[in-house]
Amino acid sequence: MKKLFGLLWALALLLLIAACGADESGSEGEDSVEPAEETGGDAEQAAGEGGGEGDLEIFSWWTGAGEEDGLNALIERFEEEHPDISVENAAVAGGAGTNAKAVLATRMQGNDPPSTFQVHGGEELNQSWVAADKMEPLNDFYEEEDLMDKFPEELIDLVSHEGNIYSVPVNIHRGNVIFYNMSVLEEHGLEPPTTFDEFFEVAEELEAAGVTPLALGDKESWTATQIFENVLLGTLGAEDYQALWNGDISFDNERAAQAADTFGQMLEYVNDDHASRNWQDAAQLVAEGEAAMINMGDWAKGYFVNDLDLGVNEDFGYLPFPETDGNFMVITDTFGLPKGVENPDDVKKFLSVLASVEGQDDFNTLKGSIPARVDADTSKYDEYGTDTIEDFQESNLTPSLAHGSAASEGYLTKANQAVNIFVTQGDTERLLESLETARVEED
Ligand code: GAL
């Protein structure tokens, strides 16, 4: 009898363990926050790989080094709050959405939208998806969640079209930042440059000392476009930089030509193998002290701190790109509700977590960006974060071309091509002509 009791007890224990296991791998398990598989840059290969039916499929390009930590933190919070909804992290590798945007376009055209996807506020959202009638307005959601006064007006404008709001900003990245290796500059008795003249003086000295002055990884050409947009901002100033995208100023003018010359001159100081590196590989040159500086959006801060274990203002310093102090090149990642998804209520639940103070703080303290919300808990941010939050409030805000806000996706593709040709050929006139022609074509 005792033996039978023992057997029954063991059986009951086994059943209990099995039941717990099933629970863990179901709704709350770690499985669903595993980073999405790297696609190895092959957009085609990844196209069509959707989540399971009914899953909340979150589409972005935040995979791998420096990119995924914030997203995983957000997903974890969501899963804690909604253990009944299973999440599919459908990220596609490639900085600035190089591959993800192509995959997304294929899916949207095939009426197979992810539940929600990363999209930059501004033209990328408006021209690619809102104008094509692919997004649901979120005005009611903003009202219900009491969000109308929780984001800076400029951000709400970037995600609005003809009076409707179409997405929720999760962050604000800054694009006009120079990150530098502190000990490299110190060792050579150099100060980080604030003007173009200073940049070239510092670059000359570094080069003479055998250090690469400026790290570049333009295997994906947006990184070079990003430098050029910052040179344009530094040369034209905030107002006229904006006027370039409004069409009030053409590229056929002396200051744009001057900016192209300065850009060309800067490219003389980059690493020889720039075309075979991506942004992380280039940032690594700075981390290791082989290069002194890099212009990168502040996702590089997330990479330096979380992935490479470097300290803000201990190992690396930061300052605005030359001659752009007082200006803030805004990059904002946002998520919306595509038309025709199976689970709009679940998507809204995710957007609600993403829009919350806690969600934004979980995400942005890891991502390198600052919260899009105006009432986030600033005590959670490091010195870079608090400096940037302050700068955002005091600066002229300008939209990034390289990250989708200033011009349409079609224009950006042509601009990236033109910049890429310029990097190899250095033909200033051709660059300006291509940029102008592309604009006329896209209008
Ligand atoms: C930007 C995006 C950032 C970061 C970066 C590098 O376009 O807004 O969040 O992902 O690309 O991939």
Image (cartoon, rainbow, N blue to C red):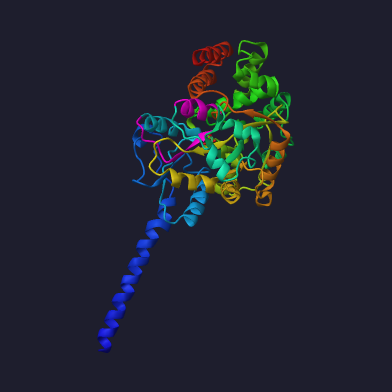
Asked if residue 322 lies left or right of residue 107, the reply is: right
Q: Is residue 139 above or below residue 196?
A: below
Q: Residue furthest bottom?
A: 1
Magenta stretch encompasses residue 127? yes
* Residue 119 screen position, x and y as percent: 50, 34
* Residue 441 screen position, x and y as percent: 49, 13
Asked if residue 224 lies left or right of residue 7, the reply is: right
* Residue 254 screen position, x and y as percent: 67, 11
User: Magenta residues?
Assistant: 110-132
Magenta stretch encompasses residue 278? no
Asked if residue 391 lies left or right of residue 412, the reply is: right
Quadrant housing the N terminus: bottom left
Asked if residue 353 lies left or right of residue 376, the reply is: left
- Residues 132 and 354: in front is 132
* Residue 270 screen position, x and y as percent: 59, 28
- Residues 413 and 196: in front is 413
Give me the residue at 51% from left, 42% from top: 67
Quadrant assignment, res 227: top right
Q: Is residue 356 above or below residue 39?
A: below
Q: Is residue 388 above or below residue 5?
A: above
